[in-house]
Amino acid sequence: MKKIQMVDLKSQYDTIKDVVNASIQNVLDTNTYINGPEVHTFQKELETYLGVKHVIPCANGTDALQIAMMGLGLQPGDEVITADFTFAATVEVIALLQLTPVLVDVDMHNMNISLEAIKKAITPKTKAIVPVHLFGRAANMEAIMALANEHNLYVIEDNAQAIGANCKFSDGTKKKAGSIGHVGATSFFPSKNLGCYGDGGAIFTNDDALAHTLRGIVNHGMYERYHHDVVGVNSRLDSIQAAVLNAKLPLLDQYNKARQDAARKYTLAFQGHANIVAPSICDVCDCHVFHQYTLRIINADRNGLMQHLLDKGIPCAIYYPIPLHAQKAYLDPRYKEEDFPVTNQLAKEVLSLPMHTELDDEQIKFITDSVLEFLK
């Protein structure tokens, strides 16, 4: 059996190396390293894929979130509501801009931000909501947008983990995650469903005026060289990373389907086990693209299982072991432990198994057998 990786980028690269190498070589041959043709091509292709008017490439996913908030003109002290159970980048940029982060609990079923928790957290100072499409599952954007419209709030989608996922609306229509809020942000970190071979990110919007502002911010606030019209940053997707993404974007749906197929096999193997809550997945599932495949281990030794798997050469991880409200950098007397029952429980129960496009049946069986062996 091939060695099991948490994310097997080498095997994925082997299947596309000719296209990737040729794309990178073209950048080297033309010396168009910054804002070259590959960047513009990727921007247009991603706009088409997502069904949005504007994609603004940038240097990484954290920058994408920060620039999105800068573009909306949020001011120090404005409150921004986001999920307590996610990676720190989401709240990090709120704090960096001297906005006031308001962390709220998540829903036990899908681990995404709780609509009821958002409702309770809204105050006269609230200006924005940042839903995170966690682990690849789309949040309930229809309800979140309705709530935001009711209270005149911005919605900034953190789509770093769910590019390609669909959000289904009550009228039967579907829209891509990241394309629904006032602005969306994503990461192209190598392990993402659409990953480059370094850092990269992008911002999405259908608002023409906001797109214009964002394009200035990513480039030192310039629309014309040496004319600085807004306060900006230096955050550009370089041409070599765009070349890699141009090779991968046409395969994104195929990659996501491979993840969904692997997830379906995992979930089937764990079905009915008293100590395992596995992600649900239907035969036509397109709302979850499984950036991570995350179990809940209940009434059992989660940490012991993790060590058991590691001892058998199976990589696994806890995303995320410490809630954001308990992190030293974000401690705040406003937060009470009783406000985060789901997040606190998830931090004790979650365990993510290997998930990538190259998982094969032999590997999946070895992984699932090993889990069940420990939990027998």
Image (tube, rainbow, N blue to C red):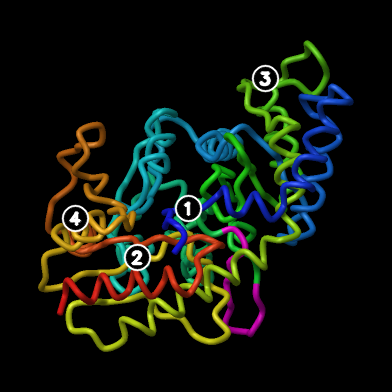
Point out residue 77 in the picture as x, y percentages from the top left corner: 37, 33
Give the mark toward the camera: 2 or 3.
Answer: 2
Whether 4 is among the magenta residues is no
Q: Which residue is mark 4?
A: 307
> Looking at the picture, which amino acid does disc 3 mark?
His
Residues in magenta, as a range: 163-174
Badge 2: how crowded within 10 Å, few (<14), some, or many (20+)?
Answer: many
Q: What distance separates the C-alpha of mark 2 from that of mark 3?
A: 39 Å
User: For the stretch drawn in magenta, what is the main secondary structure?
Assistant: loop
Q: CA distance from mark 4 to mark 2?
A: 16 Å
Q: Nearer the viewer, residue 47 or 37?
A: 37
Which is in the foreground here, disc 2 or disc 1? 1
The residue under the point 37% across, 32% down is: 95
Q: CA distance from mark 1 to mark 3?
A: 35 Å
Q: Counting residues from the N terminus, which is met first, the one under dot 4 or under dot 1? A: 1
Residue 337 coordinates in the image, percent (x, y): 12, 53
User: Which numbered mark, 1 or 3, is in the foreground of this view?
Assistant: 1
Name the amino acid type tagged 4.
Gln
Corner quadrant of residue 41? top right
Which residue position is annotated with label 3? 220
Of callouts 3 and 4, the N-terminal one = 3
Question: For mark 1, what is the residue?
Answer: 7
**Helix, strand or loop under label 3:** loop
Q: Which mark, by number, is residue 294?
A: 2
**Depth check, front residue: 59 or 372:** 372
The image shows residue 214, relative to residue 155, as above or below, that is above
- Distance of label 4 from label 1 (alpha carbons): 19 Å
Res 154 seen here: no
Q: Residues within 10 Å of mark 1 (few under 14, many from 20)?
A: many
Residue at the (37%, 46%) spot, across then down: 87
